[in-house]
Amino acid sequence: MNADDNKIIELSKTKLCWLVAASMVFVMMGLWMLRLAVTDLAPQRAYNHPVLMHGLGIVMILFFGFCAVVGIKKLLDKKPGLVLNSAGILDNSSGVAAGFVPWSEITGFSIFEMQSQKMLVISLREPGPYIMAGGVIQRLLNKMNYKLCGSPVVISANSLKLNFDELLEISQSYLRKYGKNN
């Protein structure tokens, strides 16, 4: 491995603070929805059914609470978000980070876009081991990534100190330089 050819991309503490703050706002909205009394919900208005509102509140609290916890863990994380070198990519950019992915496993990159949010999808020769990596929750999220994006390894620039275009350019450059053309 060529130690001089390491590209280290740090986690953006500013972006992570915004993520945690936004998550906490949605948790508070979920709590508000949960606290709504049945009498507060006017039955003649659409979407004011108590079960719907309370159910949505619970989902918001759980999902955005999880996002806030992951964001806080990443804020305290001293490791870089992403490292690219001659051996492969070391992903530590999210709560479902893939860890180390060697260039020999990477067949290419694609872009997944959802609500104008772009993510780098890493196409793999054998996605199975990456789907089954981690604990129960991570395996579930890996499976969801695979079904939604076509790969369990998906990297967003949201938590990194660069934008998506820079992430794509750097990743493609390293793949051309070190990837296998098989």
Image: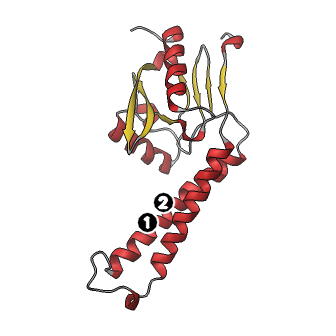
Q: Which residue is mark 1?
A: 59
As drawn, is 153 to the left or to the right of 49? right
**Who's the residue at 45% across and 83% down the image?**
36
Please say if the residues under marks 2 and 1 sit with CB atoms less than 8 Å apart.
yes
Query: In the picture shown, does residue 49 fall above or below 158?
Result: below
Query: In the picture shown, does residue 124 fall above or below 55?
Result: above
As drawn, is 57 to the left or to the right of 161? left
| Residue 63, label in figure | 2
Task: Identify residue type, mark 1.
Answer: Val
Residue 144, position in %: x, y?
Answer: 38, 45
Q: Residue furthest bottom?
A: 39
Query: In the picture shown, does residue 57 fall above or below 171?
Result: below
Question: In front: 137, or 28?
Answer: 28
Task: Identify residue type, mark 2.
Answer: Phe
The quadrant the N terminus occupies is top right
**Who's the residue at 66% across and 13% down the image?**
5
**Who's the residue at 51% across and 31% down the image?**
164
Residue 150, position in %: x, y?
Answer: 34, 33
| Residue 123, label in figure | none
Residue 18, position in %: x, y?
Answer: 61, 52
C-alpha distance separating marks 2 and 1: 6 Å
